[in-house]
Image: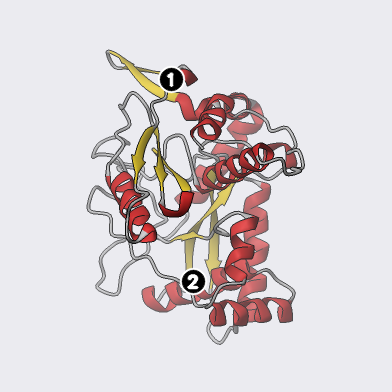
Amino acid sequence: MADAVRAAVARHESLRTRIACHGEVLELVLNPAQDLQIEFEDLSDAQDGDAAGRAVVAEIFGNHIPVEAPWLFRAKVVALPGGDAAAVMAANHFISDAGTRNILLQEIQDWLDRKAGRDVSPRPPAIPYYAYSLGERRFLEGAHGASLIDYWRRWYGRQAVMHAPSGAAMEWSAGTRIVNNFTIPRRALERVNALATEHGVTPFLVFLGIFCLAMARWSKMERFPVRVLGDKRSRLDLAGTVGLMFCADPVEIQVLPGQDLAQLMRAILVEYEASLALRLPTLHYFAPHFVRPDIEPAGYPNRIPAVFNYYSGGTARERAQRRDSPD
């Protein structure tokens, strides 16, 4: 198991990235793969292996990885009752995203399957994260990138500020982040899938339509912007790219009085596809002051407080296992 993790870290430079400070200048540096320290914990005598494993996960994910840490990726291998073992991995968001999580799990499972003598289909080659990032930078520094930046600056300038029912302006600022996680029951997902099939759309668009309808009712606004988090792995040669590959696409939403959900979804789809055609890589995600006060000019506030984050969680193997499990 540890060898499988080390092989993945050696293969993906982004997992070995750290930040070196030279005065006020920041530099990205690669750690040698062989320097990764993987911890081991023997829980083979535990009475409840599942509970013991969950405690290890809680411990690792509760231990914050600061961005200035020597390693932004950590791993531990745990021996469990019955001869089982588990690898627990954590990474700073600077070098990873949900897609990275799925890619690593799939690669480690493939490694273990090969070790056990099972046939594994080869994965298509993926563009390395740094090669993609350099291409992205060159694009933004060119004439096309400049025109996109100009377009989106003007787009931002005409967006209305969203207000809460209390009247308070909704703008990003320094503060406490509150997360409310919940699980959608399978029976609700099945109804969403049926509704999507009925209207010839994807479940993503159904959820986005519901979200926008709720935001319109909450804010009492007919027109407002939404930032839809997306994934830059939009081609086969990027499907296996490990790194911070998620982005955000701003969409202007209009919810008209008396408009039903089907009409709203069609209108949103037009705006969303237009945004994708003019995607400005990465830059829409970061909100001014999201790290600390005064990190961005105060005169350039982020006017998109409503964020829609939709991702099909888990690998294909995990989703198949969930389909066979109780609701």
Query: Is residue 71 left or right of 11 when viewed as pictured?
Result: left
With respect to residue 229, does 30 lie above or below?
Answer: above
As drawn, the label of residue 211 is 2
Residue for point 55% across, 71% down: 207
The residue closer to the viewer here, 121 or 253, is: 121
Residue 111, quarter of picture: top right
- Residue 247 visible (yes or no): yes
- How crowded pointer 2 is (Cα within 10 Å; few <14, some 14-19, many 20+) is rated as some
Query: Mark 1 sits on what residue?
Result: 28
Circle 2 SS class? helix
As drawn, the label of residue 104 is none
What amino acid type is highlighted by mark number 1? Answer: Leu
Residue for point 67% across, 30% down: 127
For discs 2 and 1, the disc positioned in front in the rendered view: 1
Residue for point 34% across, 48% down: 43
Query: Of callouts 2 and 1, which one flags the residue occurring earlier in the amino acid sequence?
Result: 1
With respect to residue 307, does 28 lie above or below?
Answer: above
Give how far across and how far down residue 194 sits, in percent: 67, 81
What amino acid type is highlighted by mark number 2? Answer: Phe
Residue for point 55% across, 68% down: 208
Q: How is the image coloured?
A: secondary structure
Circle 1 SS class? strand
Give how far across and how far down residue 125 sits, in percent: 73, 32
Residue 89, quarter of picture: top left
User: Residue furthest toward the top?
Assistant: 22
- How crowded pointer 1 is (Cα within 10 Å; few <14, some 14-19, many 20+) is rated as few
Number of labelled discs? 2
Residue 286, quarter of picture: top left
User: Residue furthest toward the bottom?
Assistant: 258
